[in-house]
Image (cartoon, helix red, strand yellow):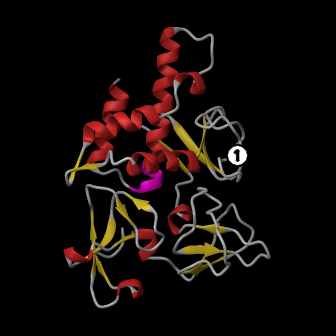
Amino acid sequence: MGLTKITHSSHSGHFLLLKYPQEPYKCEGCKELGFGPCYECEHEDCNFFLHEECANATPSAFHSFLKCSLKFHPRAPQGGERVCDACGQDVLGFVYQCKHKKPHDYHPSCLKLKRTFTAEDGTTLYLKEKPPSKCLYCGSRKTSNGIKGWSYVSSCGQDCYHVACVKDMILETWRKGYFVQDGNVNETNYYRALQSSIPNREVALPSGRSSSKTKQIWRKAKTAVMLIISALFGDPTALISLVIQQLLSD
């Protein structure tokens, strides 16, 4: 965990405080959606937020998936539309980029994704540079915008989810306004929307399974998706924790 009070060049003149908002926020560094701990301006009327990873971005970075070093930029130096090679989302702000002729781009938060984690039920997921199988959400090895993208894969190699697909799922739910209603987090609407976004049984589950086996696989699929959501957006807020509990109790 970082310092509880910092200054940052992107918001000079005010201190930023480490807080734990209970609603999604837009990071003013990378312009991406955020959950969990972040740095927020001490003045409430500023409405300025930074991911921890964006606030603490270093001039250079490395990742075991990559053979080259990456340099931090407040904006991508290469012009035109660019996407993060990890999650597939647009690069609109803070970015790490390599020096290749056709450079790769990465959001600061994507470079910090956990390589492996395990749920209480024993479900273990591993971050992979290339998916070993088709994504259970989109049914393809490539994301909707044509990049391979990083994926989280189960130890058996059969349960695979693009980071991009899970991110799309959350972004779509957010854009539809399910997170907030009349200034308050609408937990019921969010839960319903998120549940409907999780891969349906026809896509995620193989045919010819018994009812009990189907429920077990479906439960595992939901666990995997919620784990990835936590990995993407930081430590679960009360809202995300509630959703996890509801999904796993079905």
- Quadrant position of residue 65: bottom right
Residue 227 position within the rendered picture, expressed as x and y whole percent measured from the top left: 45, 43
Name the residue type under label 1. Lys
Q: Position of residue 80 (x, y in %)?
A: 66, 73
Which residue in the protein does label 1 denote? Answer: 142
Q: Is the residue 102 above or below the residue 190 in the image?
A: below
Q: Secondary structure at mark 1?
A: loop
Where in the figure is residue 16, as x and y percent of width and height?
29, 79
Residue depicted at 70% across the width and 46% down the height: 142
Question: Would you say 150 lies left or right of 58 here?
Answer: right
Residue 71 location, quadrant: bottom right
Graded by Cα atoms within 10 Å as few (under 14), some (14 to 19) or many (20 or more), the crowding at tag 1 reads some
The residue positioned 64% from the left and 38% from the top of the image is: 135
Q: Position of residue 113 (x, y in %)?
A: 53, 57
On the rendered image, what quadrant is the N terminus found in? bottom left
Q: Give the total number of marks visible in the rendering.
A: 1
Q: Would you place residue 243 above or below residue 68 in this image?
A: above
Give the position of the C terminus as an image quadrant: top left
* Residue found at x 66% / y 47%: 143
Please state if 30 lies on the left or on the right of 247 as rendered.
right
- Residues drawn in magenta: 230-234
Depth check: give the residue in front, 175 or 163.
Answer: 175
Q: What main secondary structure does the magenta stretch of the protein show?
A: helix
Q: 182 or 241, which is in the foreground?
A: 182
